[in-house]
Amino acid sequence: MTERTTTASVGQRVTHRRYVPYSHAHYAGNLVDGAYSLAAFGDVATEMCIVTDGDEGLFASYSDVQFKAPVRAGDVIEISAELVRVGSRSREMEFEVRVVGRGTPERGASAAEVLDPPVVATTARGVVVVP
């Protein structure tokens, strides 16, 4: 087996943006369940591992998951991961979901607005392991 090299360093960030489709609404008021944010964290963590280590890595744990504001169908969210600790095989990251856009159906069926400032919806810390 060949030894891999890493470019991982504290402070590196990966950010994704996506629209939350209405097919993901799970509760009244078009609320999306918290698992949606956790899945998004997995996606940015995977990209971080690919960028830094050339491997998708494996998620080992989440800690301090906080649901601070709702995520709704029709939102545009920004998901980020920032490396906060780099071990020989482990990578600890801080995650954040921010709502940057939101539908405003009271103004019209397809009306929406950019949120300035964005609303922090979910935060967490997590550890991934790379081979």
Image: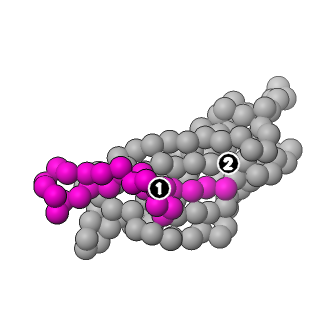
Pointer 1 residue? 117
Is residue 39 something one can see in this rendering?
Answer: no
- At 46% from the left and 55% from the top, the residue drawn is 118
Pointer 2 residue? 82
Circle 1: residue type: Pro
Instruction: Check if mark 2's residue and mark 1's residue have beta carbons within 8 Å.
Output: no
Left or right of residue 6: residue 128 = left
Q: From this viewpoint, which residue is outermost toward the bottom?
A: 28
Left or right of residue 94: residue 23 = left
- Asked which colour scheme the image uses, the reply is one colour
Left or right of residue 6: residue 57 = left
Quadrant housing the N terminus: top right
- At 80% from the left and 33% from the top, the residue drawn is 6
- At 51% from the left and 61% from the top, the residue drawn is 120
Is residue 64 something one can see in this rendering?
Answer: yes
- Circle 2 SS class: strand
- At 39% from the left and 54% from the top, the residue drawn is 115
- Circle 1 SS class: strand
- Note whether 9 is above or below 39 in the view shown: above
Mark 1 surroundings: few (<14), some (14-19) or many (≥20) residues within 10 A: few
Residue 57, quarter of the rendered image: top right
- Note whether 33 is above or below 56 in the view shown: below
Magenta extent: 94-121
Label of residue 86 in the image: none
Circle 2: residue type: Glu
Left or right of residue 5: residue 19 = left
Q: From this viewpoint, which residue is outermost toward the top?
A: 2
Quadrant housing the C terminus: top right
